[in-house]
Image (spheres, rainbow, N blue to C red):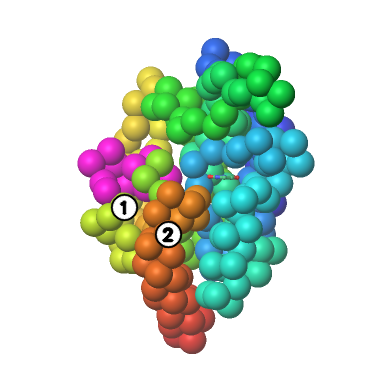
Amino acid sequence: MRIPEELAEWGKKRIEPYSVEGFVYGGGPENPALMLVGEAPGETEIHNGIPFSGRAGKELMKFLERAGLKREEVYITSAVRSRPYKWREKTERSGEIIQRKYNRTPNEKEIMAHAPILDWEIEHVNPKIIMTLGNIGLRRLAGKDKKIADIHGQLLKQPVRCCQKDGTYSWTEKDYLLFPTYHPASIFYNRSLLETIHRDFDQLAKYIKEMHDS
Ligand code: URA
């Protein structure tokens, strides 16, 4: 399923003032066992339009496989749907210095600009479990004080943050099942997180099986 085109256009307009490029739609089935909420697309994703299709995505697909899930069974989205970038100098092999765009973490304003999109997806996709990947997705939904290191691998039943017309967040009336884990790209910087993420996905697979069997 896909968000309505008017909502996508509104999201593009809201994020226009910031240093971002492209727009990648979230995608997957309605009523899935799992929705994945990442951070923001990177360079690969804005070129091919497929969320988590770059280097981090390859790791994510291995984790899903470990949990017995296929990409097509899962709804995949992120807090921000455009690629936040910063310009930096890069020295080419020839010694020439060029300006290049690098990925960066989305800021609060960018996350708010695309908040109505994620709100819509959560309401209409209706996943059984929402798995946040990294601190950005976790804090967007569970609040700014949350830390992935403290609560990864736990199933939390609680309201999630949703945006209001005045540009602030409130909480949903409904409870959702949140399951935070680390962003798959975290293993590129800290290899020791791989085992932790494996354990989290094993735990997730157990919860999904229990829900399926009950
Ligand atoms: N990281 C994300 O959070 N989303 C993507 O689509 C790619 C990398």
Is residue 194 placed above or below 98 in the rendered structure?
below
Closer to us: 213 or 194: 194
- The disc placed on residue 148 is 1
Residue 122 shown in magenta: no
Residue extending furthest toward the bottom? 213
- Is the shortest distance between ligand 1 and the CB of mark 2 under 8 Å? no
Q: Tell me the element at label 2.
A: loop
Query: Residue at 59% of width from left, 67% of height from top?
Result: 62
Q: For marks 2 and 1, give the one nearer the viewer.
A: 2
Determine the residue positioned at 54% across, 38% down: 40
Most distant residue in the right direction: 48
In this rendering, does residue 177 appear at all? no
The residue under label 2 is 191
Q: Can you give x and y, in whole percent of width and height, for residue 138 in the image?
A: 37, 47
Q: Which residues are magenta?
A: 137-147
Spatial separation of the CA atoms under disc 2 and disc 1:
16 Å
Nearest to the observer: residue 35 or residue 135: 135
Name the spot of residue 86 as percent of width and height, x first.
Answer: 53, 22
Image quadrant holding the C terminus, namely bottom left
Query: Horizontal placement of 136 versus 63: left or right?
Result: left
Q: Quadrant of residue 15?
A: top right
Residue drawn at point x = 76 percent, y = 41 percent: 48
Residue 206 spot, x, y in % from top left: 43, 80
- In x, y percent, where is residue 16? 59, 16
Between residues 20 and 94, which one lies in front from this camera angle?
94
At a point 38% along the width and 61% down the height, the residue shown is: 193
Report ligand 1 position as a quadrant: top right
- On screen, 200 above or below 1? below
